[in-house]
Amino acid sequence: MKYLLSIFLTICVIACYIFSHGCNRAHTNTTVSSNTPTRTQDYNQEAMKVIIEGKGKFPQSLAGKWRADKGGWEFTFDSEGNITSAIINMGRQQILPGQTKEVPLKQDGKGIYKAGIWTVRYNPGERKLTVEVIMDQISLHMGQQSIEGDTTDILTGTVSEDGSTWHTQWYNYPEYIVTASDFAKLLDSDPKNNPIDVVIFEKIPQ
């Protein structure tokens, strides 16, 4: 746990400095300037997978928006379990599976987010919901600071009986090259495969 937390904090410190408005605005796009539009490719439906274990369908009670108590995570599921809106942890960026997004950063910097295949898995018998978010590329460059690499995040846990909360363990598998003015370092996954944190999602009333 300490290994992965140290990696995560290192990434966060550098990322917070790179992003235009720091890290104090969860659930907002903190890297986009007000006068420069973000460029985003079209959503790729083939990059979204939904797996229901055993018999049954994705519960209608789970459709809607879920917001995390930490990390900036947010997911909206449709009636079939597809993710139709999402905010990821890195940069609090709004992005969807299969999308590539380019955002401006301070000091004429640039960020590129390229999402890979995302998977939603649900086990009805255990009320266990798992979301796997694969980012094939995260490239953030500003001045002499940069983060370059890819990452996979897995949030998995049980939905409460009343369908109002989703208690998850957050696993993070990064492979980044972090560069600053005086060092460059490879940051990769915890060899012990420990979760990085416990994250609790709340269903947002419509």
Image: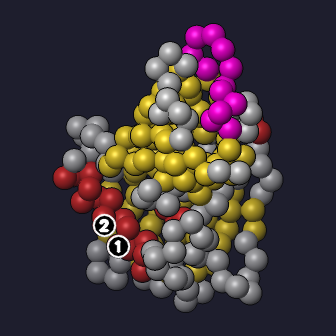
Looking at the magenta stretch, what is its main secondary structure?
Answer: loop
- For the residues labelled 1 and 2, the Cα–Cα distance comes to 5 Å
In the rendering, which numbered label is found on residue 118?
A: none
User: Residue at the spot x=75%, y=62% of the render?
Assistant: 40
Membership of 127 in magenta stretch: no
Q: Residue furthest front?
A: 162
- Image location of residue 93, percent across then percent down: 59, 63
Q: Residue furthest right?
A: 42
Membership of 62 in magenta stretch: yes
State the image quarter where residue 41 is shown. bottom right
State the image quarter where residue 16 is shown. bottom left
SS at badge 1: helix
User: Residue at the spot x=51%, y=68% of the render?
Assistant: 26
Which residue does the numbered mark 1 point to in the structure image? 13
Task: Specify the amino acid type for callout 1.
Answer: Val
For residue 200, say whether it is visible: yes
| Image vertical order of residue 187 relative to residue 121, above or below | below
Please tell me how crowded label 2 is: few (under 14), some (14-19), or many (20+) other residues with Cα within 10 Å. some
The answer to whether marks 1 and 2 mark residues whose Cβ atoms lie closer than 8 Å is: yes
- Image location of residue 156, percent across then percent down: 44, 35
Near-viewer residue (43 or 73): 73
Near-viewer residue (146 or 51): 51
| Image vertical order of residue 51 relative to residue 13, above or below | above
Stretch of the chain drawn in magenta: 52-63
For residue 18, say whether it is visible: no
Position of 133 compared to 37: left or right?
left
Which residue does the numbered mark 2 point to in the structure image? 10
Task: Specify the amino acid type for callout 2.
Answer: Thr
User: Residue at the spot x=42%, y=80% of the render?
Assistant: 17
| Image vertical order of residue 92 relative to residue 124, above or below | below
The number of numbered badges drawn on the structure is 2
Near-viewer residue (170 or 78): 78
